[in-house]
Amino acid sequence: MEIKTIKRIAVLTSGGDAPGMNAAIRATVRAGFFYNLEMYGIYRGYEGMIQNDIKKLESKHISHILERGGTILKSARSQEFRTAEGRKQAFENLQKHQIDGLVVIGGDGSLTGAHLFYKEYGIPAIGIPGTIDNDLAGTDLTVGFDTACNTAIEAIDKIRDTATSHDRLFFVEVMGRDAGFIAINAGIGSAAAATLIPEKKMPIERLVERLKARTKAMKQSNIVIVAEGGKSGGAAEIADKIKKQLPYYDIKVTILGHLQRGGAPSSLDRVLASKLGVAAVEGLLNGKYDVMAGVINNKVVYTPIAKAIVGHKEVDEYDFHVVKILST
Ligand code: F6P
């Protein structure tokens, strides 16, 4: 593949925000400055690319952002970028600013956009996995996942205090759209009575049996983690079903929701985001286009975006095994 000379790189964040996105922006921009490039920020993801909301970035724009949650570039889920006209408009705007390289920080939808855009317009693009869901192949972890798990576990610890005081059964719903990664980690990390994830169906009868067994074993509190979008329904739906079969339980439901998307990034997310920001810029300079920079076994790797977004990263069977053993 021909290596193009790159002088101006634009960076954007797209899709659901994730803690560590700012650290990734900072690392990308700093790496660009290190290699004497001009760096641009595209605001509100692809939406801003279409609306020409593109600004040159200087050092002052990215100072003291590494430790901040959210994204200074803002984010959006652009419907217009899904249309050929939207992408054409976006490309014309990039040309106006003479942008010859693109760093896209986001999840599978955002990287799909980058892949399509590269195929249509040939503008060198590279992805950084930024999503709390951790559902991309080509990286052990996505930026934001670790912080989201920490947030979820901290919240569940607090719920356990009140659950124990009142002898209550709690159903706690965590994020993860179609992926059970946050749920599995939260389940292991908070000693949940059961963990329900989209990837594996757990019949209600089995959950009932599990809860009955725990009552017999005089367990002090019961917390069931439910991943949103689970096959048996969300936390409220499952709680209703359980209430019908175990009416003597005092049941409460907590949906952690967007709480998991905010907050200062953990050290792990800061380091991961920083490595990937540098890797993204160096990748572009070395002719690695239409790929996602990720970390596997602590080494930076570049995976074709088409592979990173294909299907779904599988939940580790061993993790699931650990959940089963520890929640009986
Ligand atoms: O993809 C990240 C994520 O937080 C999912 O876990 C969740 O289902 C979704 O985004 C929520 O999206 P929104 O903020 O647009 O409601």
Image (cartoon, grey):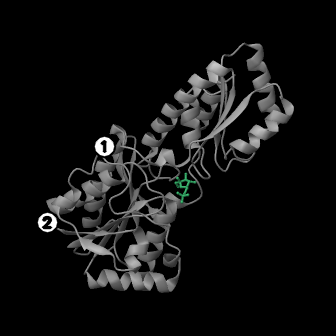
Please state the horizontal and vertical placement of residue 20, each as a whole percent of the image. Answer: 36, 49
Q: Classify residue 88 by image quadrant.
A: bottom left
Whole-angstrom CA distance, mark 1 to mark 2, is: 23 Å
Determine which residue is flagged by label 1.
271
Q: Image height check: is 102 above or below 297?
A: below
Instruction: Identify which residue is drawn at 22% across, 73% down.
Output: 8
Instruction: Identify which residue is drawn at 51% across, 60% down.
Output: 108
Specify whether residue 199 is in view: yes
Q: Classify residue 146 by image quadrant.
A: top left
SS at circle 1: helix
Please state the horizontal and vertical placement of residue 24, each as a whole percent of the image. Answer: 32, 54
Quick one: 174 or 243, which is closer to the camera? 243
Say the numbered circle drawn on residue 36: 2
Q: Residues within 10 Å of mark 2 (few under 14, many from 20)?
A: few
Specify whether residue 202 is in view: no
Say the numbered circle drawn on residue 22: none
Please state the horizontal and vertical placement of residue 137, each as a whole percent of the image. Answer: 50, 52
Q: Looking at the picture, which amino acid does disc 2 mark?
A: Asn
Instruction: Identify which residue is drawn at 73% across, 47% down.
Output: 233
Please state the horizontal and vertical placement of residue 78, each as a whole percent of the image. Answer: 49, 72
Q: Quadrant of the C terminus?
A: top right
